[in-house]
Image (cartoon, grey):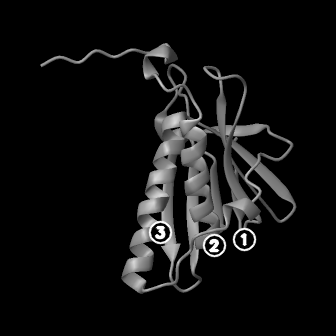
Amino acid sequence: MSLEIELDPIDFVTIGTVGPKGRRVFYLQAGGQGQVISLIIEKEQARAIAEALRDMLDEISRTLGLSNDMPDMARMNMELREPIEGRFRISRIGLAYSEERDRVLLIAEEMIVLHEGQDPRQASPSVVRLWGTRTQMRALSLHAMDVVKQGRANPAHNGRVLYYWT
């Protein structure tokens, strides 16, 4: 059963992990309007969110001549909040900016696993839309990159070693 959730505005947004290194589960979490939404993401999705937000926010500031949106990270609470119950695993993430509202929109779409014989046209993924300030999204970008870097320094220790040759 698909959900459509829109938090407009969000009170907070963060990325965090649960579990020991090597078996960490990454979550994108946001809250607003009395709700806390936790979504499961992959480590590389966390990195991609961080980089895409950084690039988008830099471009918005440069193009529109807007003020610096750098947060005071010491004052930001970037911890995951309870309950941490993943509503779904994210397959796709989109970003947009409303110049009129000066708000960033993060859209997360559910990963759908089709069963044998299931018609993909009948699959209806859940969608979560999160509307935040440029400062909130910049904090998310900075924090997400820190969370990603907290993993093992040597990717060969993550159980997946890829060999390339030419």
Left or right placement of residue 85 versus residue 149 in this view: right
User: The C terminus is located in which quarter?
Assistant: top left
User: The N terminus is located in which quarter?
Assistant: top right
Furthest-left residue in this view = 166
141 to 68, vertically: above or below: above
**Camera-side mark, 3 or 1:** 3
Visible residue check, residue 124: no
State the mark number for residue 53.
none
State the mark number for residue 9.
1
- Disc 2 crowd rating (10 Å Cα; few below 14, some 14-19, many 20+) is some
Look at mark 3 in the image and give the residue it sits on. 57
- Disc 3 crowd rating (10 Å Cα; few below 14, some 14-19, many 20+) is many
Query: Mark 3 or mark 1, which has the lower sequence index?
Result: 1
67 to 54, vertically: above or below: below
Query: Mark 1 or mark 2, which has the lower sequence index?
Result: 1
Mark 1 in CB contact with mark 2 (< 8 angstroms): yes
C-alpha span from label 1 to label 2: 8 Å
What residue is drawn where x is 65% and y is 54%?
Answer: 128
Look at mark 2 in the image and give the residue it sits on. 133
**Horizontal and vertical percent for residue 116?**
51, 19
Left or right placement of residue 85 versus residue 93 in this view: right
SS at mark 3?
helix
**Horizontal and vertical percent for residue 6?**
69, 62
57 to 107, vertically: above or below: below
